[in-house]
Image (cartoon, grey):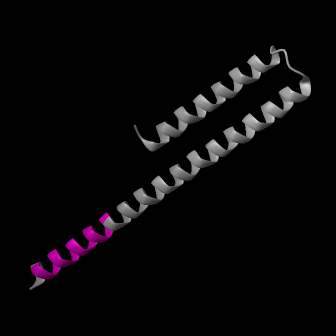
């Protein structure tokens, strides 16, 4: 799967998990304060996971950009060498 697809799947999973947890907690027999604390904790965990996924995506894009740049440079060098041989 492409890195962009993994990010979308992860985002959808996290949103679904958070929504399910929130709904379950709304019907749980605990105090409002406990529920708010739990939801805040889970929201922070979700944010941390989303930031981690974004970091991985940025790193993958940087590697792809470097690979493409190197390929272009090699292509230019090969073209230059071919032109030099042709004119010699």
Instruction: Tell me residue 36's x, y (percent).
Output: 85, 30
Of 7 and 33, which appears nearest the observer? 33
Drawn side of residue 82 relative to residue 22, left or right: left
Magenta residues, dominant SS class: helix
Q: Residue at x 48, y 38 (%)?
A: 6
Q: Residue at x 84, y 34 (%)?
A: 37
- Tally of numbered discs: 0
Instruction: Tell me residue 43's x, y (percent).
Output: 74, 36
Picture layout, residue 34 above or below residue 83:
above
Instruction: State yes or no: residue 58 in magenta.
Output: no
The stretch in magenta equals 71-85
Q: Residue at x 41, y 56 (%)?
A: 64
Picture layout, residue 47 above or below residue 26:
below
Drawn side of residue 19 relative to residue 7, left or right: right
Drawn side of residue 28 relative to residue 68, left or right: right
Question: Which residue is the extreme one toward the bottom?
Answer: 88
Instruction: Tell me residue 80's x, y (percent).
Output: 22, 77
Picture layout, residue 23 above or below residue 74:
above
User: Which quadrant is the N terminus positioned in?
Assistant: top left
Drawn side of residue 2 relative to residue 79, left or right: right
Instruction: State yes or no: residue 83 in magenta.
Output: yes
Instruction: Tell me residue 70's x, y (percent).
Output: 33, 67
Q: Residue at x 80, y 15 (%)?
A: 28
User: Which quadrant is the C terminus positioned in?
Assistant: bottom left
The image quarter in which residue 41 lies: top right
Picture layout, residue 32 above or below residue 47:
above
């Amino acid at each position: 799967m492409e890195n962009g697809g993994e990010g979308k799947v992860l985002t959808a999973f996290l949103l679904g998990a958070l929504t399910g947890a929130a709904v379950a907690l709304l019907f749980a027999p605990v105090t409002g304060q406990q529920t708010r604390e739990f939801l805040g904790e889970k929201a922070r965990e979700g944010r941390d996971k989303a930031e981690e996924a974004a970091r991985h995506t940025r790193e993958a894009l940087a590697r792809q950009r470097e690979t493409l740049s190197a390929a272009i440079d090699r292509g230019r060098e090969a073209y230059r060498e071919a032109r030099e041989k042709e004119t010699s």
